Amino acid sequence: MVRRDVPPAGAVRPTSSVPANVPPVRDPHDPSDGPANAPASRPAPVRGNAAVPARYEPQPPVVVVPQQPTPDSAPDVAPAAPPSDTPPDAGYGAEPPASTYVSRETPTREEDDPPLAMEAMRAVQILNPSGEVTMPRPERTRVMCVANQKGGVGKTTTTVNLAVALALHGNRVLVVDLDPQGNASTGLNVPHHTGVPDVYDCLIDSVPLEEVAQAVEGIPNLWCVPATIDLAGAEIELVSVVARESRLARAIAAYPGHFDYVFIDCPPSLGLLTVNALVAAQEVLIPIQCEYYALEGLNQLIQNINLVRQHLNPKLEVSTILLTMYDRRTRLADAVEQDVRNHFGDKVLQSVIPRNVRVSEAPSYGQSVMTYDPGSRGATSYFEAAQEIAERGVKEPVSRNA
Ligand SMILES: Nc1ncnc2c1ncn2[C@@H]1O[C@H](COP(=O)(O)OP(=O)(O)OP(=O)(O)O)[C@@H](O)[C@H]1O
Ligand SMILES: [Mg+2]
């Protein structure tokens, strides 16, 4: 097996970017940001044995059913989370209904971490209190490539949050982290330090995906194929490999996981890794940041998609455009939205993701914003986007071309 020799320093997985005793910095652009002294900084969860990843084991899909609070147990002041000395199931029924839920955007007191699964259950209660919203499972696996060669537009954030939202509502979801930065693995709190079997092994050494996929802790139905720093060498090593553009497609096709969704988080480039993602997918999801340079480079991406469709993957289409980091106070964001809607029409989701400080804080706690702060505007927007994607998947099966 050919592997890059990686210095140990680069192999250390970041835990929390927020020092323990430093309060989070307020986002001056976010009017919803709470007071500067909250929320309390919390250390990233520590995993038992990071070197031995959990393996994928087929399980029936689990739907997290919201549990309604009983009137007797409802507290006067709704706690954001059960205290740490409360047994896991005691007091869960006492969770506040959505109407009394206080988002961490306006925190009232410091709380300890509940277990991750409790966070997930609580997220569903808050986002979907009546349980009315369903995210129907598609007939066939939808493989979605989340791509935009422009950096920092929200590809990873979108991948992680849509995946969590769909998984929390009964869909079986696999996230393939195809970016050597490993941000999706970090965001899902999946070990991805050097030595952990990763997507590099699948691409270069034909290791089956099920041998490297890890169950995401606390989120039922969600698995992640992590990326380690080894993947940085794959772009060059792939050049001399047989069927170099379709290595990922073959690996996904051979995976017996029966997923409803496979999200592939691409790096900010149009190299062989992104080409592998485009060949493996039926759909491209392009996150577009509502900023001045947002549309620059999009033509190049669309041309590449067209080339891949012509030569390698006739099923490929741009199915979904998602506007991210929308700042409603600026006219620019509005202008970008209009431009994108005029150009891409109904491929653009109605849901728009606002710039929201909770979205950017969540990864430093190894969480999606869906579980980190389900009441925040970031979480509710991603929840709505996931719902739209799920509904489109059953109403109008993939047919349009970019
Ligand atoms: N809606 C949002 N509100 C505030 N911050 C956001 C939002 N979406 C993303 N961010 C932040 O913007 C930065 C870039 O986001 P992200 O990593 O998802 O982009 P990316 O396109 O995957 O980047 P790259 O091209 O490097 O892979 C991150 O710090 C992320 O936390
Ligand atoms: Mg990314």
Image (cartoon, rainbow, N blue to C red):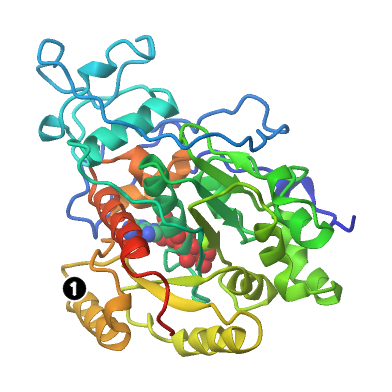
How many numbered discs?
1
In the rendered image, residue 363, in percent from the top left (x then y), is placed at 45, 46
Near-viewer residue (72 or 48):
72
In the rendered image, residue 120, in percent from the top left (x then y), is placed at 37, 33
Q: Residue at x 36, y 73 (%)?
A: 321
Which quadrant of the figure has residue 128? top left
Q: Is residue 400 above or below residue 230?
A: below
Which quadrant of the figure has residue 350? bottom left
Relative to 235, 143 lies left or right: left
Relative to 288, 270 lies left or right: right
Q: Quadrant of the C terminus?
A: bottom left
Q: Is residue 275 above or below residue 14?
A: below
Which quadrant of the figure has residue 110? top left
Q: Amino acid at mark 1?
A: Thr
Mark 1 secondary-structure assignment:
loop
Near-viewer residue (166 or 155):
166
Q: Residue at x 46, y 43 (%)?
A: 364
Residue 253 visible? The answer is yes
Q: Which residue is mark 1?
A: 330
Q: Callout 1: few (<14), some (14-19), or many (20+) C-alpha neighbours within 10 Å?
A: few
Q: Residue at x 41, y 56 (%)?
A: 138
In the rendered image, residue 387, in percent from the top left (x then y), is placed at 29, 55
Q: Residue furthest front?
A: 139
Residue 103 visible? The answer is no
